[in-house]
């Protein structure tokens, strides 16, 4: 038994989708688990840490969550700025549009932004009024607004590692009554596949995963982290701990108690890195990462037994 976390988090893709699906949707935490995001760790190109599976991205995850929960939508990407603007204008509170990935640095409804910094983000658009896009930004800005041309500029993916410009999902329709627990139970084999690396998505050359990635990051801590890696971890550590906490709660609700306990242990190890890194406790951070690494295989095995 453990105490799951409730509060602010950085699962913008899952939060945006949960908002768009409306009151019949599970919360963002369950949606995030169904995307597959908690089930792995990687060092992208051998240097950039992510607490998500090698080969995974938010686009893959959103499609997986929708299918698991029994929903369909209209997916659109690319096209002209005029076509993208028309999609924004078609959005309403009753028929919202999930826009993303977008470049967070160009979402200038937040003071201090104005240049691309390569951070992907998702928002839920519910209309255009007075030439302003009206949207919920799950980073903590409900009922935000931005001129259409500025929103369009942020909606380009030139500065991001994945995704096509003007990608959106809309016209959400429920085709089956599937609870979050039922969906999680049905996806247990998929989660194990992410951990095992047997999914269909190819892993980019140079990426290392799970125990090898944890050992690599531990060695990086001991050698001295770069400023960029520290900045990456400022985001990824709390995001990773939240994902694993949600995984523990959802797996418990689905009756996978052994797997739930392992995910909860991983959540504690990842979350504990926050203080170790802030306080310069290098030995403790490295030890936590080396304890974390073998748990990815243990989690895969527990899921396969569930």
Image (spheres, rainbow, N blue to C red):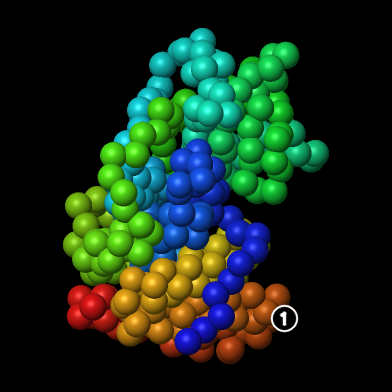
- Image coordinates for residue 36, horizontal then vertical, percent: 36, 59
Identify which residue is drawn at 67% across, 79% down. Answer: 275
- Image coordinates for residue 184, horizontal then vertical, percent: 32, 63
Q: Report the number of numbered marks.
A: 1
- Image coordinates for residue 179, horizontal then vertical, percent: 36, 57
Q: Is residue 152 visible?
A: yes
Residue 169, placed above or below residue 203: above
- 252 or 262: nearer the eye? 252
Quadrant assignment, res 189: bottom left
Residue 153, placed above or below residue 73: above
- 257 or 51: nearer the eye? 257
Identify which residue is drawn at 31% across, 58% down. Answer: 183
Identify which residue is drawn at 44% across, 87% down. Answer: 291
Quadrant for the C terminus, please: bottom left
Residue at disc 1, secondary structure = loop
- 237 or 123: nearer the eye? 123
Residue 100, placed above or below residue 296: above
- Image coordinates for residue 76, horizontal then vertical, percent: 38, 25
Q: Residue furthest top?
A: 82
Q: Is residue 229 visible?
A: no
Mark 1 neighbour density, 10 Å: few (under 14) some (14–19) many (20 or more): few
* Residue receiving disc 1: 279
Q: Is residue 178 left or right of residue 140?
A: left
Q: Is residue 188 left or right of residue 73?
A: left
């Amino acid at each position: 038994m453990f105490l799951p976390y409730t509060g602010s988090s950085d699962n913008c893709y899952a939060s945006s989708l949960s908002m768009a699906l409306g009151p019949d949707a599970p919360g963002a935490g369950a949606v995030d688990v169904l995307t597959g995001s908690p089930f792995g760790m990687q060092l992208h190109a051998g240097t950039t840490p992510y607490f998500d599976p090698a080969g995974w991205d938010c686009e893959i995850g959103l499609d997986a969550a929708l299918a698991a929960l029994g929903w369909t939508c209209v997916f659109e990407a690319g096209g002209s700025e005029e076509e993208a603007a028309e999609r924004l204008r078609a959005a309403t509170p009753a028929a919202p549009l999930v826009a993303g990935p977008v470049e967070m640095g160009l979402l200038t409804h937040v003071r201090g932004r104005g240049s691309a910094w390569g951070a992907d983000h998702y928002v839920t658009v519910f209309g255009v009024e007075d030439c302003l896009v009206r949207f919920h930004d799950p980073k903590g800005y409900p009922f935000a607004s931005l001129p259409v041309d500025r929103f369009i500029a942020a909606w380009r993916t030139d500065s991001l590692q994945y995704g096509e410009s003007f990608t959106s999902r809309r016209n959400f329709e429920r085709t089956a009554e599937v609870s979050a627990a039922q969906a999680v139970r049905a996806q247990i084999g998929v989660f194990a596949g992410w951990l095992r690396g047997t999914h269909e998505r190819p892993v980019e050359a140079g990426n290392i995963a799970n125990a090898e990635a944890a050992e690599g990051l531990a060695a990086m801590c001991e050698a001295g982290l770069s400023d960029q890696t520290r900045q990456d971890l400022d985001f990824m550590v709390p995001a990773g701990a939240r994902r694993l906490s949600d995984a523990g709660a959802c797996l418990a609700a689905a009756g996978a108690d052994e797997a739930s306990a392992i995910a909860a242990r991983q959540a504690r190890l990842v979350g504990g890195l926050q203080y170790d890194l802030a306080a310069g406790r290098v030995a403790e951070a490295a030890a936590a990462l080396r304890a974390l690494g073998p748990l990815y295989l243990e989690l895969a095995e527990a899921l396969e037994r569930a």
